[in-house]
Amino acid sequence: MDAFEWWKRVIERTWFLGGVHPSSIEKFIDSASEELFEHFSGSSGFSLYEDTIPTLQELYTNKYKLGIITNSDNRTKQVVKSFGLDRYFSFIITSESMQLQKPDPKLYSAAVENKYIPQQVCHIGDDLFGDYLASSKAGFNSILLDRKRKASNFNDAENVVKITSLTELV
């Protein structure tokens, strides 16, 4: 199943669970899915946090190699480019391209591709399980981006290396 069909099913299921009548779903699902898929294929469907560009610029200037590992589809590359951020990243690995999802360690292995050893890599993510714990298990140094300070709700939260803003990296 390609990314469009996957997202179409998500939209269809969401509408159904939200109480939309099946005949209305059938009538509008194709056009709505196409419109939403297109909308979220570029910068118009997303916004950046204030700390994103200054932090990327600083890390890039200081010669850090940056990459993206995401549970999203291949539109991520278009979105990154539409924001003008593609120059900062050496690679983008998507779940769609790998046919895997975090926390599968093979995603992290693909990121290092024999160019780096995991101990020289720092993974920063906003999901305690899919990012922080998974990348730690793969041998990476890991940082949890906890913008909403939710990590304190977990039992081992005191052992988690966390930041609340990307500016804490520079």
Image: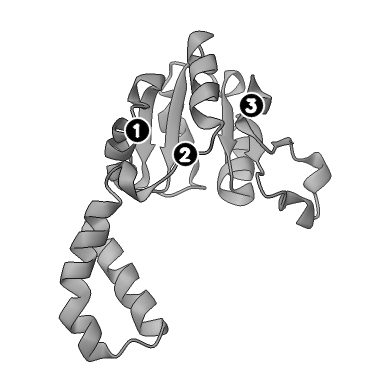
Cα–Cα span, label 1 and label 3:
19 Å
Mark with earlier residue (1, 3):
1
Are discs 1 and 3 less than 8 Å apart at CB?
no
x, y percent for residue 123: 57, 31
* Residue that numbered label 2 is attached to: 48
In the rendered structure, which disc, 1 or 2, sits on the residue that comes first in sequence?
A: 2
Residue at the farthest top position:
62
Mark linked to residue 46 = none
Query: What residue do we see at 52% from left, 47% from top?
Result: 103
Whether residue 25 sits left or right of residue 115 in the image: it is: left
Please, what is the three-letter code of the amino acid marked with disc 2?
A: Leu
Q: CA distance from mark 1 to mark 2?
A: 9 Å
Residue 27 image-quadrant placement: bottom left
Q: Residue 35: image x %, image y %?
A: 21, 61
Q: Secondary structure at mark 1?
A: loop
The part of the image, by quadrant, that contains residue 36 is bottom left
**Mark 2 packing: few (<14 Cα in 10 Å), some, or many (20+)?**
few
Amino acid type for the residue under numbered disc 1: Phe
Asked if residue 74 shows in the view, the reply is no
Mark 3 packing: few (<14 Cα in 10 Å), some, or many (20+)? some
Q: Secondary structure at mark 2?
A: loop
Q: Which residue is mark 1?
A: 83
Q: Which numbered disc, 3 or 2, marks the residue that appears first in the sequence?
A: 2
Looking at the picture, how far across and down is residue 154, in whole percent? Answer: 76, 55
Give the residue number, with chain letter if any, for mark 3: 167
Residue drawn 33% across the image and 86% down it? 20
Amino acid at circle 3: Thr
Q: How far apart are the two marked residues, 3 and 2, measured between alpha carbons?
A: 14 Å
